[in-house]
Image: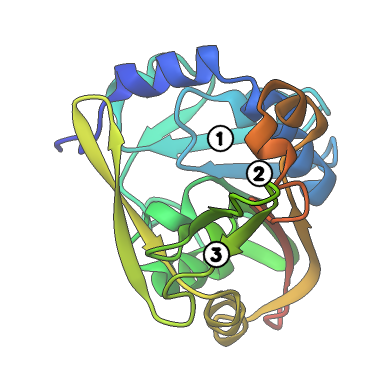
């Protein structure tokens, strides 16, 4: 099995960028609301930050990822596998699945929703933290008015499925864009019922560090989704 990105770049990126700890992980815990007696799967767990913060609640957590280098940093139960396949997990074997900055890197989001619905027990949870579709749309980006410095947002090709390429160390990452409507419809077809949708702009700490981000405080950067598995027992 061959990895398709630069694990060392990711480890360095996480170490120097506090956004994950300040914004992403708190949103995950808020959405997932992990229970001590429950078993959760971290899909695309990377080096295990999400696993560790969920485990602090007393919950049991397993992870899966493609990259062996990152899995070596987890320090917990993991399986090396490529999403969206979860064929190594039995039906209804976990209480919840969470995906953190993963869905936008999967070419097949439909199968991801279906596989998660298969392995999660009825009424179980799927929690997703992702780059907001307004941010992932090809051609999207900030627009700065030279007259007064006001920042607005170019939506790009928001309504069309598309991809963009982002540099990631020695590799380029493909970012898959789908509108929010497309994502919610795909989840519903797989049997997921939307329980919560949370849109967030740059957090206070990020705005303090970067004046451009401060000017974008009303522009969504992250989206958090919580679903309940509506499939019958």
Give the mark nearest the N terminus, 1 or 3: 1
The reply to whether the C-beta atoms of the residues labelled 1 and 2 are less than 8 Å apart is yes
Of all residues, the one furthest to the left in this rendering is 2
Residue 206 rendering spot, x and y as whole percentages: 71, 28
Q: Which residue is mark 3?
A: 133
* Quadrant in which the C terminus appears: bottom right
Residue 187 rendering spot, x and y as whole percentages: 58, 77
Q: Say if residue 92 shows up in the picture.
A: no
Q: Which residue is mark 2?
A: 40
Closest to the observer, 140 or 144: 144
Gap in angstroms between the C-alphas marked 1 and 3: 28 Å
- Residue 76, quarter of picture: top right
Gap in angstroms between the C-alphas marked 1 and 2: 6 Å
Q: Is residue 134 left or right of residue 177?
A: right
The reply to whether the C-beta atoms of the residues labelled 3 and 2 are less than 8 Å apart is no
Mark 2: secondary structure: strand
Q: Which residue is mark 1?
A: 62
Residue depicted at 62% across the width and 83% down the height: 188
* Quadrant in which the N terminus appears: top left
Comparing labels 3 and 2, the label whose residue is closer to the camera: 3
């Amino acid at each position: 099995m061959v990895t398709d990105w630069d694990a060392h770049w990711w480890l360095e990126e996480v170490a120097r960028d506090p956004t994950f700890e300040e914004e992403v992980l708190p949103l995950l815990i808020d959405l997932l609301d992990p229970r001590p007696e429950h078993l959760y799967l971290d899909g695309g767990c990377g080096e295990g930050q999400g696993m560790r913060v969920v485990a602090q609640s007393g919950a049991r957590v397993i992870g899966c990822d493609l990259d062996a280098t990152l899995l070596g940093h987890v320090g917990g139960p993991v399986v090396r596998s490529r999403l969206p396949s979860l064929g190594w997990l039995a039906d209804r074997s976990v209480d919840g699945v969470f995906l953190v900055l993963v869905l936008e890197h999967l070419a097949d989001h439909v199968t991801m929703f279906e596989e998660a619905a298969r392995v999660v027990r009825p009424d179980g949870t799927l929690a997703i933290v992702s780059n907001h579709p307004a941010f992932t749309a090809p051609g999207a980006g900030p627009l700065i008015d030279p007259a007064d410095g006001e920042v607005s947002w170019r939506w790009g090709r928001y309504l069309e499925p598309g991809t963009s390429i982002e540099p990631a160390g020695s590799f380029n990452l493909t970012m898959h864009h789908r509108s929010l409507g497309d994502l919610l419809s795909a989840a519903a077809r797989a049997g997921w019922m939307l329980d919560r949708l949370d849109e967030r702009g740059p957090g206070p700490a990020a705005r303090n560090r970067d004046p451009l981000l401060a000017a974008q405080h009303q522009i969504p950067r992250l989206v958090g989704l919580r679903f309940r598995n509506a499939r019958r027992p």
